[in-house]
Amino acid sequence: MIKNLLRWLLSPLGRMSLLIAGLVFLSVAVWGVSLTQAAPAQPIQFPHNRHVGFGIQCLYCHPGAARGPVAGLPSQTKCWGCHQQMQITQTSALLKPLVNAVENNQPIQWVPVAIVPDFVHFNHRPHIAAGVNCEECHGDMSKVTIAENPQVMNMGWCLNCHQQKTVDDPVKRTKLLDCGTCHY
Amino acid sequence: MSKRISRRDFLKLAGAAAAGGAVLTGCGPASRYVIREPYIEMPEYNFNGQSTYYATTCRECPAGCGLVVRTYQGRAIKVEGNQKHPVNLGKTCARGQATLHGLYNPDRVTAPVKQGRGGVLSNETMTWEQAIQVVADALANTPPSAMAFLLGLAPDHLFDLVGDLTKALGAPAPLRFGALALFEARSTLIQAAAELFGQPALPFFDLANASLTFSFGANFLETWLSPVAYTRGFSRMRKQQVRGHWVQFEARMSQTAAKADEWIPLRPGSEGLVAAAIGKLAAEAKGQPAPAAFASVDVPAAAEASGVPEETLRRLAGLFAAAERPLVIPGSAALGQVNGLENAQAALALNALAGNVGQPGGVFLSPLPPVAEKNHALASLQEMADFIEKMKAGAIQVLFVHGVNPLFELPKSFGFEQALQKVPLVISFATFPDETALQADYIFPDHHGLESWGYQRIATGSTRAALSGAQPVVSPYYDTRATADVLLAACAAVGGKLAAALPFADEVAFIQDKLLPLVEVKEANFNAPEINTFSAYFQQFGGWWAQADGLISPTAPALGKALNVEAPQYQGEGEFVLLPFVSPVLGEAGANKPWLQEVPDPTTTVMWNSWVEIHPKVAHELGLENDDVVMIVSEAGAVEASVYLYPAIRPDTIAIPFGQGHSAYGRYAAGRGVNPLDLVAPVFNLSGDLAFAGMKVRLEKTGKKRELARLESKIGVYGEGLEEH
C-alpha cells in the first residue's frame, strides 16, 4: 500500500499535490514566524508628531541618550506634569489609558520599538557626542504617531554609517570597525 | 561527493534543511519584545536611562558578604561584590549571584495568609492589621516561658530585636540554628577554641600567609564559615613568594580537597588520632620531647585506625616540622563525630606545637563584632533536641519561626514534625513557602533580603571588627512586610512594658538606635557627626568597619594535658560509613533557585538531583553501575538515590550531598532528590553538636535505574561506561 502511495506521488497529480502541501506548510510557517516577530500593541497610541510639533525636545523625555547607554522612557509623573494642566486630558479617549495609569498608580507597559539584540552593547552617548542627531537613526518623529523604525537596525546598517563617517580618519575607522567596540 | 547526489543537489538540500530548521524552531529571539515599565514616579537621585547602584548585604548564607546591586528603573539587575567590604573585597560566590532568583522567584509568599497547616500554600489571605493583631494576641496572652523564637544563623538586627523583646517579656532567648552550623559543627569549633585559648570565639585561620596548611575536613572553599573570605585566603596562600603547600585530610575528595596538593583519605573520625600522631612525630623530628598532649598516642595504632600508612604520617610530620609557618584547620566532618571535640582540640593543639598562635600564617580569634554585648551563641544540636523535647511535652504554646526551615534542616529523627503538632500556635515569617512555613498556622511573609533593611554582625572572615549594612535595593514587589516592623507594631499594640522596651516607630528607627554607639568611634571606614549622616554613610559604604585589624592573638596553650584522642566510633550497623556533605552550590537553601540547580556540582558535575558516591571497585563488587538506584538504610531511616561511581572516595565510605530533597519550597525545589539528614540519628559529641558523619549504613539494590543529569562524560577513569558507547 505504501508502495502504491509512493508511486502515486511520482505521478504528475501526486507531484502537484506534494507541491501544494509544501506551499501550505511553508506559508503557515512564515505566518508563524511573522507572529513571533510582530510587536504587541502599544498601550497608548502615542502621537510623537504632536509632541514634536509643540517644540518638545527629544531629550526632554529621553534624557538618558545624552548621558549613557539607554535613552530611557519618561516616568508618568513627567507625562502628568504637562497633561494635568490640559483640558483634553480629561476628555480625550486616546488619553484614557494615561489617566487610568496615573489614577491607579500603575506603570504604563510600553513596547520598545528600536532595539538591538542582547549581544550588542549599544551606547547612545558617544553617538550624541559625535553630533549624530536623533532623527538620523530614528527617523523624523514629526511625521509619525507611534515611533517607527525607518530602517532595519542590523550590523550592516551600523557599519555602513561607521564607515561613511570615518573616511578621512584611519585611527577612528579602526576603532569603529572593530568587533569589540559593540560585541564585548 | 557520490555520483548519486551532485554537489549542487547537496547544497540545495542543505539550504532547504537549514531553512526548514529555522522555520520549525521559530527563530525569533525570546527577549525581542520584553515590555518596559518606566517608573511611575522616579526617585530624585535616579536619572532616566541610567542604572543606580546600592550597597547591601548578601543574605544567602550567614557569612555576611557585602554586595553592590545594579538596579534599572526600580529593578535589581545584577549582583556584584562590594570592593570595600572587609569580608569579600568585591567577590561573591554563586549563591550570592543567584540571590536575584530568590527576589524574582515565582513561588514567593505574596501576602499574609492563614495557612492552617495545609500541605500547600493557603490562599486565605489576611490584611496586615489582622496579622499584627494575631502576633500581638500571641505575645499578650501566652505565658512568657511558653513562647519560643526560632531564628536563622545570621546574627542580624532581627536577632537583636527579638533578643530585646524576649528580655522585656521574660521569655527564653531566641534560638539561632541552621543546617550550615550543623555541618560545620560550629559549636564544637568554638568550644575547642575556648578550651585551648580560654575565649569562646570563632578562630580565624590566616590561610593567606601559611606556608604549609593541614586541613582536617574543613571545606573552606565551599560553604565553611566564610567561603568567599577563605577562598581569597587560599588564592593569596598560593601566590606567596614560595607557593604554600596544602594537605587535605578527609574521607572523600571534596571540591576543596580537589584543589589541595595532597589528599589523604583517612577514615572519618580518625582526624584527632592522625593530628596527634603527626604532633608526636613532628616533635620528635624537631628533636624535642613530645608534649604531654600528644605523648600518649600510639603511632602504629593511629596508622591502623585511620587507614593512613605510617610512612605517610612520618613524611607529613617531617613536612610539618620543617615548615616555616604551618597552619592546621579543623572543620566540618572531622568535628561532626562522636569524638568531634577531641578531633578539633588535637588539630588546634598542633598549631600551638608549631608556635603559630597569634602569628602571621597562624591561628587568631575573630575580632568581636561591634554592637554586641558578647558573641551571641548559636544553639547546638543538643540544645535543639532539648527544645524539641520541650515542644513534645507541650511546654511551648507559641512558636515564631524566621530565617530557618527546621523541617528540612534538622534530621527527621529529631522528631520536629511530631513536636510541631504539639504546639498550638505556629507563626512563620518565611519569604518562601518552605516545609516549615506550610506546617504553620500563619505565614506573615518577610521581604526578600534585597527588599529589606538591616545590619549583620560579621562573626568571622574579616580581619576587622565589622557590621555589614543592608538596605532595600528595590521596593517590595509583593504585600510583604519586614518581620521587625510586624513585631514592633505588635509590641505597640500590646502596650505596657513591651511597648516601653521597644518604643520604635519602625525597623529603621530600631537599627539607628543600635548604631548610635558607633557614631562615637572615630577609627572607622567613615566618620559622621550625628546619627542621620551616619546612617546615610552606613548605607553608602554597605556597613561599618574598623580602620585597623582587630584579630585577637590568644595566648598559646601549654599542651601539658594529655589529649583524649580515640579511634572513631560509629553508630548503627552496615558496611559503609555515611558522609553527608553540604552541596557547595546549593547550600542549605539554594534549591529553589534554577541558576544554582543548573550549576554542575564541582566534583561530579551532576545537576538537578541527588546522588550517592560509591567507590567504583566496591560498586562493581556489589554489581552496581552508574545511575542504578540504591536504597541507603541506616538505623534512623532510608533514602533512595542514584549511584555515582566516584573513584575519589574511601571504599568503606559513601557520600550524599545535602541541599536537595525538599517536599515543598517552590516548583524548582520540591520533589527533587533526597535529604541525607533523614539517615542521621540523634547522636552528639561532647559539645552537643551532631555526629552526622559517623552513621553506619547499608545498601540495598532496588533494581531501578534513574539517570542523573551530568555535564561530564559517563566514561569513567577506569574505562567503565565504554561498552555503552
Image: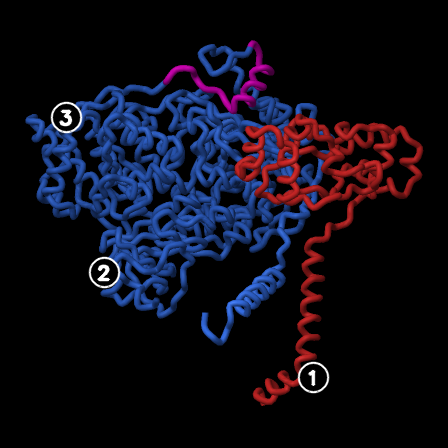
Instruction: Report the quarter where the C terminus of chain B lies.
Output: bottom left
The count of marks equals 3
Residues flagged by tags 3 and 1 on a common chain? no
Foreground pick, B147 / B650? B650
SS for callout 1? helix
Picture coordinates of residue A108, whole percent (x, y): 76, 40
Residue bearing mark 1: A13
**Which of pointers 2 and 3 indicates the residue nearer the eye?**
2
Kindly indicate which chain is depicted in blue in the rendered structure: B
Tint applied to chain A in the drawing: red
Residue stretch rendered in magenta on the structure: B529-549
Residue B195 placement, left or right of B403: left
For the residue pair B52 and B218, the one nearer the viewer reads as B52
Label 3, label 1: how many angstroms apart (C-alpha)? 103 Å
Q: Nearer the viewer, residue B522 or B594?
A: B594
Which amino acid type is marked by label 3?
Gly
Q: Secondary structure at mark 2?
A: helix
The residue under label 3 is B560
**How far across and how far down the image is residue A143, in percent?**
84, 39
Residue type at numbered disc 2: Lys
Identify which amino acid the numbered label 1 is placed on. Answer: Leu
**Chain letter belonging to callout 1:** A
Distance of mark 1 from mark 2, alpha carbons? 66 Å
The colour mode here is by chain
Residue B161 showing in the rendered view: no
The Cα–Cα distance between marks 2 and 3, rounded to whole angstroms, is 45 Å
SS at circle 3: loop
Q: Please give the label number shown on residue B617.
A: 2
* Viewer-side label of 3, 1: 1
Pointers 2 and 3 in contact (CB under 8 A)?
no
Picture quadrant where residue B259 is located? top left
